[in-house]
Amino acid sequence: MKNRLKVLRAMRDWSQAELAMHLDVSRQAVNAIETGKHDPSLPLAFKLARLFEMPIEEIFDDQP
Amino acid sequence: MTNPETDLKEADVNMTSSNPGSSKFTFAALVFVTFVAVIFGAGVVAGFTDAGGGDRPDVLFGIYAVWVAVVGGLAFLAARSWSRLMKAPKEMLSRSTRRSRNVLYAALVVSAGLGALLSMAQPEGTSIFTNGPLAVFPALVAIMVWTVGGSITTLMWWRMTDEHDRASYEAGANVAVHAYLFIAPSWWVATRAGLLPEQDPMVVMLIVAAIWSAVWFYRKYL
């Protein structure tokens, strides 16, 4: 699934490790989500939405 | 006015905190090689003694000297690597990652200890890969550690690690179970046809575990 995580993270000047700390996941998990290799669960998607203060639809795009 | 979404440079986006992963790998590799050298040296000494080498104390002393020098050298390098690792900037880890890694390290240490115990508890001498008889007490300890300790450790790790790690582990399990479904019956049929020797469950288990680990590693890190 496409997403804007990489851009949103960079706008806050966070490294992948820093974002991983906020989400309580590994840096590899953040990398996998950013590159579209792993689709996050609903709880993790909501966590991301709360962290970036925007709706899930503005972070993730399910359109091909 | 700039647009942050288009002006971001790839270098900015890909930045990560300092990652001492290679140092950790070096240290882990040195510990592993030291452990193998200890076991291998014990095997050489046991084999030499069994072959009547006890009559040549000068040669036995030489073997001991080389063994101690190699293991000592490797242990020194491992200690130096550990020292450098401790001085390096700490890798930023989330709580779940740190806890799951600690469980993994503990499991590796216990597994290595278990392997050393089994390799030394054989009446016929030190060896890692054998189906030879074992002394009863070390066998019972190994069974208890593996069944009780192994299942508790796995459950702890499963509850602590993050969803991406769990997904990688599940993908590995899926492929590994299918590999088992293909390997075990094929070997059984091949044995009945006289094409292969009797099936060794430990060899099958090692193949399945290797496939499981390879898929997990690929999904998690690559």
Image: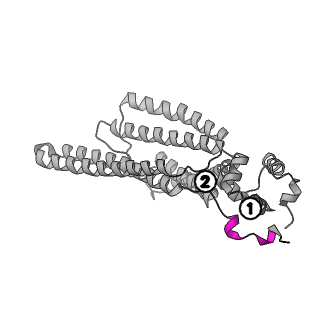
Residue B162's mark?
A: none
Q: Is residue B185 magenta?
A: no
> Which residue is the extreme one toward the front?
B1
- Tag 2, which chain? B
> Which residue is the extreme one toward the top?
B137
Q: Locate residue B135, reporting x and y percent.
A: 35, 31
Nearest the camera: B75 or B184? Answer: B75
Say which element carries label 1: helix
Q: Is residue B185 visible?
A: no
The amino acid type found where label 2 is placed reads Trp
Q: Locate residue B20, reporting x and y percent.
A: 53, 55
**Residue labelled with disc 2:** B216
Q: Is residue B108 visible?
A: yes
Residue at 55%, 43% (x, y): give it.
B104
Residue at 38%, 29% (x, y): give it.
B136
The magenta segment is B5-18
**Residue labelled with disc 1:** A10
- Classify residue B10 by image quadrant: bottom right
Say which element carries label 2: helix
Q: Do discs 2 and 1 share a chain? A: no
Nearest the camera: B31 or B139? Answer: B31
Is the residue under label 1 in contact with that under label 2 (CB below 8 Å)?
no
Instruction: Measure how far apart labels 2 and 1 are at the Cα level.
Output: 29 Å
Q: Locate residue B69, reporting x and y percent.
A: 25, 50
